[in-house]
């Protein structure tokens, strides 16, 4: 027969669990819907950015897309127009701006046009990106500056221009920075790209702290290899040794990445991983990231130690692959392709 302590435990455990879940629910940021929101997507003419724009349009958001390539921008605009309800005037719901966000004046112009068209701005998504991987010693200063300009400074310029409008949205406001799994772990050949993507993490953490009194949420997306024009371009210069290290995993469809991103935007998550590997990597690299979920915090506490061992073994495997490649090929395959 069960004693009094057993009965007390049977009662206490569900109460503790229920209390934890109530506190966890109250602790989370305000969940939002994109319906009626005004959203600016930089890099919205293709890949993940276009897919995020599509999902936002389907939810009833007013969307402005920004890109450098005018032909792709026009094609993307038509693609988004086809998603609008028949009675929805395109001019009221869609805007396309040909601009280079890596130029501060262009970034300001794109934001100003979006605010003028929609009367407000609730979310800005910085999805522009470029990757031309080379080993550091064979890379050029010009390429390193270009990757920092596109991947980091374009986001800075866009956010600086959009911040006053985003702050007016308060708890409904969202700032989305698209990093990469190469912004969580450095990989051979990605010295310039990883540096820019890691920089976004520092920007996001500090910016989130500066916005805590407003309630605006910063979201960091960490996509894996994704089947986009950027990846196809990247593969043209990717060193063979890098391919040997990273393997031949099948790229994620951009729409799958976009769905994960939009869900994170709605929830107000700070870290937005994609896929199971991405989820584990987000826990392994949580560091001093803002905590927006007590449930995830509990998982981080339980898994941080074991995942540190997994991370150490993974990096050791990468290093072994690099040494093996150099031993067998005597450095061939490290130079950038012509």
Image (cartoon, rainbow, N blue to C red):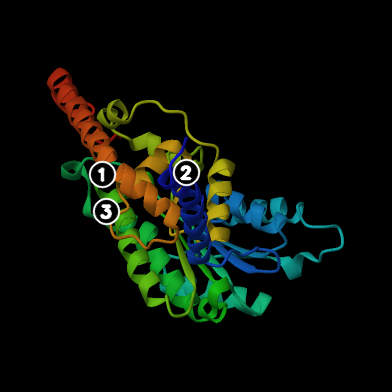
Is disc 3 in contact with disc 2, using a CB cutoff of under 8 Å?
Answer: no
Residue plotted at (37% across, 63% down): 290
Single out the residue that lies furthest toward the top. 328
Residue linked to disc 3: 195
Q: Is residue 185 left or right of residue 60?
A: left
Name the residue rendered at 47%, 33% in the picture: 251
For label 1, the residue is 186
Residue 193 coordinates in the image, percent (x, y): 31, 49
Q: Quadrant of residue 188?
A: top left
Q: Between label 2 and label 1, give the one nearer the viewer.
A: 2
Relative height, residue 147 to residue 205 (above, below): above
Residue 89 in view of the camera: yes
Q: Residues within 10 Å of mark 2 (few under 14, many from 20)?
A: many
Q: Quadrant of the C terminus?
A: top left
- Density class for disc 3 (Cα within 10 Å; few <14, some 14-19, many ≥20) is some
Q: Earlier in the sequence, mark 3 or mark 1?
A: 1
Q: Which numbered marker is on residue 274? A: 2
Q: Looking at the picture, does residue 134 appear above or below residue 262? A: above
Looking at marks 3 and 2 on the same chain, the residue that comes earlier in the sequence is marked by: 3
- Left or right: residue 31 versus residue 131 is right
**Gap in angstroms between the C-alphas marked 3 and 2:** 21 Å
**Given this view, does label 3 or label 2 mark the residue nearer the observer?**
2
Q: Residue at x 50, y 55 (%)?
A: 15
Report the front residue among 294 and 212: 294
Q: Nearer the viewer, residue 76 or 269?
A: 269
* Cα distance between the residues tagged 3 and 1: 8 Å
Q: Which quadrant of the figure has residue 253?
A: top right
């Amino acid at each position: 027969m069960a004693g009094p302590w057993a009965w007390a435990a049977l009662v206490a455990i569900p109460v503790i669990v229920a209390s934890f879940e109530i506190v966890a629910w109250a602790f989370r940021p305000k969940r939002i819907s994109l319906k009626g929101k005004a959203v600016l997507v930089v890099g919205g003419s293709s890949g993940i950015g276009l897919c995020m724009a599509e999902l936002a349009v389907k939810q009833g958001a007013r969307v402005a897309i920004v890109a450098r390539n005018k032909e792709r921008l026009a094609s993307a605009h038509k693609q988004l127009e086809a998603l609008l309800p028949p009675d929805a005037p395109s001019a009221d719901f869609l805007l396309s701006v040909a601009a280079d966000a890596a130029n501060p004046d262009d970034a300001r112009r794109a934001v100003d046009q979006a605010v003028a068209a929609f009367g407000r701005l609730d979310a800005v998504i910085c999805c522009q990106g470029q990757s031309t991987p080379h080993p550091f010693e064979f890379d050029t200063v010009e390429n390193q500056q270009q990757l920092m300009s596109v991947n980091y400074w374009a986001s800075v310029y866009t956010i600086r221009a959009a911040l006053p409008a985003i702050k007016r949205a308060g708890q409904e406001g969202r700032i989305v920075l698209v990093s990469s799994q190469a912004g969580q772990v450095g990989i051979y050949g990605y010295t310039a790209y990883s540096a820019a993507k890691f920089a976004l993490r520092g920007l996001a953490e500090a910016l989130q702290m500066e916005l805590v009194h407003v309630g605006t949420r910063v979201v960091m997306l960490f996509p894996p290899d994704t089947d986009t024009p950027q990846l196809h371009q990247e593969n043209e210069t990717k060193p063979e040794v890098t391919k040997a290290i990273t393997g031949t995993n099948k790229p994620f469809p951009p729409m799958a990445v976009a769905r994960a991103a939009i869900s994170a935007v709605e929830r107000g998550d700070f870290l937005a991983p994609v896929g199971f590997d991405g989820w584990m990597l987000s826990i392994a690299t949580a560091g001093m990231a803002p905590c927006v979920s007590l449930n995830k915090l509990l998982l981080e506490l339980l898994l941080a130690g074991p995942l540190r061992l997994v991370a150490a073994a993974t990096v050791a495997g990468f290093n072994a692959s690099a040494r093996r490649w150099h031993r067998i090929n005597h450095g061939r395959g490290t130079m950038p392709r012509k």
